[in-house]
Amino acid sequence: MNLFTRFLRPSVGEQEVRAEIWRLGSRHLGWPLEGALSELKEPGLSAERAVLLRACVHKLRTQAA
């Protein structure tokens, strides 16, 4: 991803990310990171959903480190 597209990406609120992580954990039997990565591979994913899932992946990976 180049610098220009980084600035044009819509931002996602912290509360929205936390809520989606909780829902991912519920849908994927307690594995929200794996669930988000799996859902990112699904065809027909909207751009907004992809941004939210990437934010969740980023948050979960930072928490694990």
Image (cartoon, grey):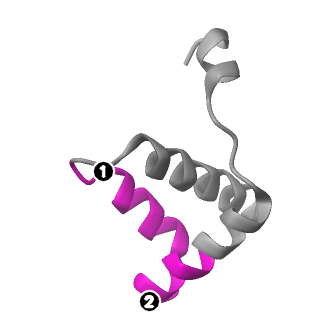
- Quick check: 64 above or below 48? below
Q: Please name the residue shown 50% across and 76% down the image.
A: 24
The residue labelled by disc 2 is 29
Left or right of 38, for residue 26: right
Q: Which residues are magenta?
A: 21-43
Q: Please name the residue shown 30% across and 50% down the image.
A: 41
Q: Please name the residue shown 38% across and 52% down the image.
A: 40
Q: Amino acid at mark 1?
A: Lys
* Magenta region includes residue 41: yes
Rendered location of residue 23, percent (x, y): 53, 80
Rendered location of residue 10, percent (x, y): 64, 36
Which quadrant, please, contains the C terminus?
bottom right
Q: Which mark is residue 7?
A: none
The local secondary structure at tag 1 comes to loop
Rendered location of residue 25, percent (x, y): 53, 82
Q: Amino acid at mark 2?
A: Leu
Q: Which mark is residue 41?
A: 1
Left or right of 42, for residue 33: right
Mark 2 closeness class: few <14, some 14–19, many ≥20 residues within 10 Å: few
Left or right of 13, for residue 50: left
Secondary structure, magenta segment, majority class: helix
Q: Across the whole image, how many numbered discs are drawn on residues?
A: 2
Q: Are marks 2 and 1 in contact (CB under 8 Å)?
A: no
The local secondary structure at tag 2 comes to loop
Of 65 and 45, the residue lying toward us = 45
Of 62 and 9, the residue lying toward us = 9
Which quadrant, please, contains the N terminus?
top right
Q: Label 2, label 1: how many angstroms apart (C-alpha)?
A: 18 Å
* Magenta region includes residue 63: no
Residue placed furthest toward the left: 43
Q: Quadrant of residue 27?
A: bottom left
Q: Please name the residue shown 45% across and 47% down the image.
A: 50
